[in-house]
Image: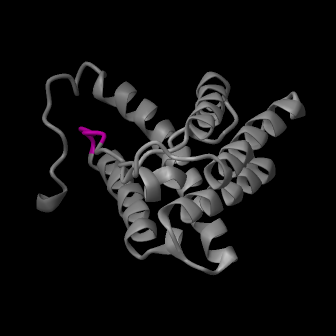
């Protein structure tokens, strides 16, 4: 399967994930995001590409709309998930950076989320030909990144406590 077809397939599955898992009080907003993602998939399959490794401009525009909406509103779907869908073409796989927690408990939670993300990506679940495996991978990555965002806020709060300020991040290797 070409990188462009793989990306279009991931985007179509991502649109289904958004419809099934996103939350917004105005339901039409969920449909707007999912529709923009589907428009990008259609554009990838029908628009010419200027350079290999780049998305066609109509797809870029549709994905920008979806990403902007995901960023500006809390749909409970992190915007970074779009980058997992486009990775076959762009060659850029999103990362989950360490949060540098001072506390051991929070550092372990961070390490666990990153290990789970690594397992989904490295075991090739995003490249599975099985529809259910691909859906589960996208849902899993959505949940993990959402939890990572919430954990980042908790760690920032904990690291800013007077007794934690200036401390080095917890070293889990020595625990």
Residue 150 x %, y %: 50, 37
Horizontal arrangement in the rendering, residue 94 relative to residue 81 (left or right): left
In the depicted structure, whether residue 75 falls above or below residue 52: above
In the image, 83 versus 151, the foreground residue is: 83
In the image, 158 versus 45, the foreground residue is: 45
In the depicted structure, whether residue 26 falls above or below residue 80: above
Horizontal arrangement in the rendering, residue 87 relative to residue 21 (left or right): left
**Residue in the image at 38% along x and 60% along y:** 112
Q: Give the residues in magenta.
A: 99-103
Report if residue 139 is visible in the image: no
**Residue in the image at 57% along x and 40% along y:** 78
Residue found farthest to the top: 162
**Residue in the image at 58% along x and 30% along y:** 64
Main structural element of the magenta stretch: helix, strand or loop? Answer: loop
Horizontal arrangement in the rendering, residue 118 relative to residue 148 (left or right): left
Q: Quadrant of residue 91?
A: bottom left
Residue 88 x %, y %: 45, 59
Residue 119 x %, y %: 40, 70
**Residue in the image at 57% along x and 47% along y:** 48
Q: Quadrant of residue 146?
A: top right
Residue found farthest to the right: 27
Residue found farthest to the bottom: 130
Asked whether 106 falls inside the magenta stretch, the response is no
In the image, 131 versus 143, the foreground residue is: 131
Residue 20 x %, y %: 79, 53
């Amino acid at each position: 399967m070409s990188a462009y077809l793989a990306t279009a397939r991931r985007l179509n599955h991502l649109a289904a994930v958004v419809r099934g898992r996103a939350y917004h009080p105005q339901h039409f907003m969920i449909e707007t995001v999912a529709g923009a993602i589907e428009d990008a998939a259609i554009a990838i399959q029908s628009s010419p590409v200027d350079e290999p490794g780049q998305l066609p401009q109509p797809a870029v525009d549709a994905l920008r709309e979806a990403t902007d909406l995901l960023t500006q509103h809390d749909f409970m779907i992190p915007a970074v998930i779009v980058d997992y869908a486009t990775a076959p073409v762009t060659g850029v796989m999103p990362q989950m950076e360490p949060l540098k927690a001072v506390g051991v408990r929070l550092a372990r939670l961070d390490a666990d989320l990153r290990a789970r993300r690594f397992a989904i990506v490295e075991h090739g679940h995003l490249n599975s030909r099985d529809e259910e495996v691909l859906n589960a991978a996208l849902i899993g990555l959505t949940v993990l990144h959402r939890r990572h965002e919430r954990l980042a806020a908790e760690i920032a709060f904990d690291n800013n406590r007077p007794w934690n300020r200036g401390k080095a991040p917890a070293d889990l290797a020595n625990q």
